[in-house]
Image (cartoon, rainbow, N blue to C red):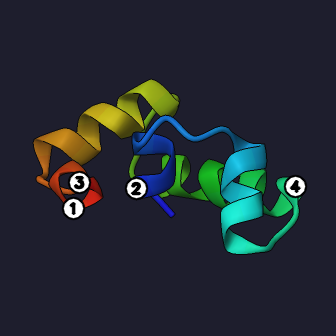
Amino acid sequence: MLLQPAAAHSNAEIAARLGIGDETVQTHVSRILTELSLRDRVHAVVHAHLHGLARRLG
């Protein structure tokens, strides 16, 4: 789930790709941010890049 926002996908796009509701995506993204002590999606993208997770997107 962390890789989807890192690829600049909106909640609606993530929901469509995963076959889940927008609210479910919002909940998961919020929980990821909390668990990783990140402030927002921008910091999640930076985190993904710094930890080599974003390379898997290609």
- Please say if 2 is above or below 8: below
Contact check, label 1 and label 3, Cβ < 8 Å:
yes
Is residue 53 toward the left or the right of residue 18 in the image? Answer: left
Q: Amino acid at mark 1?
A: Arg
**Disc 4 designates what residue?**
23
Query: Quarter of the image holding residue 21?
Result: bottom right
Query: Quarter of the image holding residue 2?
Result: bottom left
Q: Amino acid at mark 3?
A: Gly
Mark positioned earlier in the residue sequence (3 or 2): 2
Q: Amino acid at mark 4?
A: Glu
Q: How far from the left and from the top, in percent, is residue 47? A: 26, 41
- Please say if 39 is above or below 29: above
Residue at 21 percent across and 61 percent down: it is 56
Residue at 50 percent across and 44 percent down: it is 5
Q: As rendered, which of 6 and 32 lies closer to the eye?
A: 6
**Disc 2 designates what residue?**
3
How packed is label 3: few (under 14 Cα within 10 Å), some, or many (20 or more)? Answer: few
**Disc 3 designates what residue?**
58
Q: How far from the left and from the top, in percent, is residue 58? A: 23, 54
Is residue 56 toward the left or the right of residue 6 in the image? Answer: left
Label 4 and label 3: CA atoms lie apart by 27 Å
Q: Amino acid at mark 2?
A: Leu
Contact check, label 2 and label 1, Cβ < 8 Å:
yes
- Under tag 1, what secondary structure? helix
Q: How far from the left and from the top, in percent, is residue 11? A: 72, 45
Contact check, label 4 and label 3, Cβ < 8 Å:
no
Mark positioned earlier in the residue sequence (4 or 1): 4
Q: Which mark is residue 56?
A: 1
Contact check, label 4 and label 2, Cβ < 8 Å:
no
